[in-house]
Image: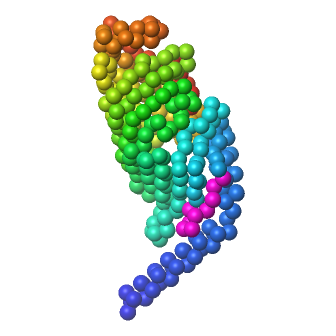
Amino acid sequence: MKAAKVARGFALLAAVLALFVMFSYMLFPASRIDAVIAQVLLRQGLTLAPAVHKTLLPGLAWDNMLLSSEQGPLLSCDRLQVRALLLPLFVGRVVFSGGATIGKGSLDIRYALNGKDALNLAADGISLSDIPFFKSALGAKAAGSFWSRGTLKRSAKGLSGDLKLEIKQLEFSGVKLGAFPLPDVANLKSQGMIRALDGKARLESFTLEGDGIYMRLSGDLPTGANAAVLPLNLSLEIMPKPEFLEKQKLVFMLLAKFMTSPGVYAVPIRGNLLKPEIL
């Protein structure tokens, strides 16, 4: 009898909580949410279109979403959806689930505002050619299939964890960071990791290896709500073989000031995520 009363009480509490969430969701205008998002993005020189709309279950969605800066479009996806998960509320956790369809690829994120488990991320089959950032921000053509898996845990000092990255058959051409170009490359094997520790993030040796060239990108990454416009502190090591260097002699002549030893270039990348530059 006691167990049955506890079960009925829990069921009643769950029903009341679910009704409260549903009524709050129905009464809260989507236009107000849109205004808050627009204000946050505006501080970083970003815009998001079209306007958000509510979904059948408590959540928000954008169809044919486009994130842009003054340079042009940065990220587009067929559909972006974010929703609050109801079950975790019953144990006092606030968890949001997000999903995006980008061409034939997908991105899924689960983020909790409280509790030890903070973030789970999975990305599969995202083609770099479907991401307009490379053309708008770098003036470049890019191709390759992007994959990622990662988790973050929360502690009193901040978020910690890692995010594995891989790009299959990476290629890019026409990349220019500030006044300096990068060599055109194709069919690279690329993998690396972003490691977070106590709220700080670092790109741990993202390697790019192909016929005649080896590159390694590493350094500190900005975090937080204004990460897109905070300064970058990255280093790109470029180690071309003699035949590759000869084919792109002009590019390496322009990068000559960054040569640290014969056949090794250490290129500092500054600026920010929206406008990286070689200084």
Residue 17 placement (x, y as % from top left) = 54, 74
The quadrant holding residue 209 is top left
Residue 127 placement (x, y as % from top left) = 43, 40
Residue 179 placement (x, y as % from top left) = 55, 15
Q: Residue at x 30, y 17 (%)?
A: 212
Q: Is residue 52 left or right of residue 188?
A: right
Q: Residue at x 33, y 28 (%)?
A: 188
Q: Nearer the viewer, residue 121 or 68?
A: 68
Q: Is residue 123 left or right of residue 86?
A: left
Q: Nearer the viewer, residue 140 or 261?
A: 140
Is 211 inside the magenta-drawn segment? no
Q: Main secondary structure of the magenta part?
A: loop
The quadrant holding residue 162 is top left
Is 55 inside the magenta-drawn segment? yes
Quadrant of the frame with the N terminus:
bottom left
Q: Nearer the viewer, residue 140 or 88?
A: 140
Q: Residue at x 54, y 25 (%)?
A: 139
The quadrant holding residue 218 is top left
Span shown in magenta: 51-59
The outermost residue toward the bottom is 1
Above or below, 25 relative to 50: below
Q: Residue at x 45, y 55 (%)?
A: 110
Above or below, 276 relative to 263: below
Res. 154 visible in picture: no
Res. 86 visible in picture: yes
Above or below, 125 relative to 80: above
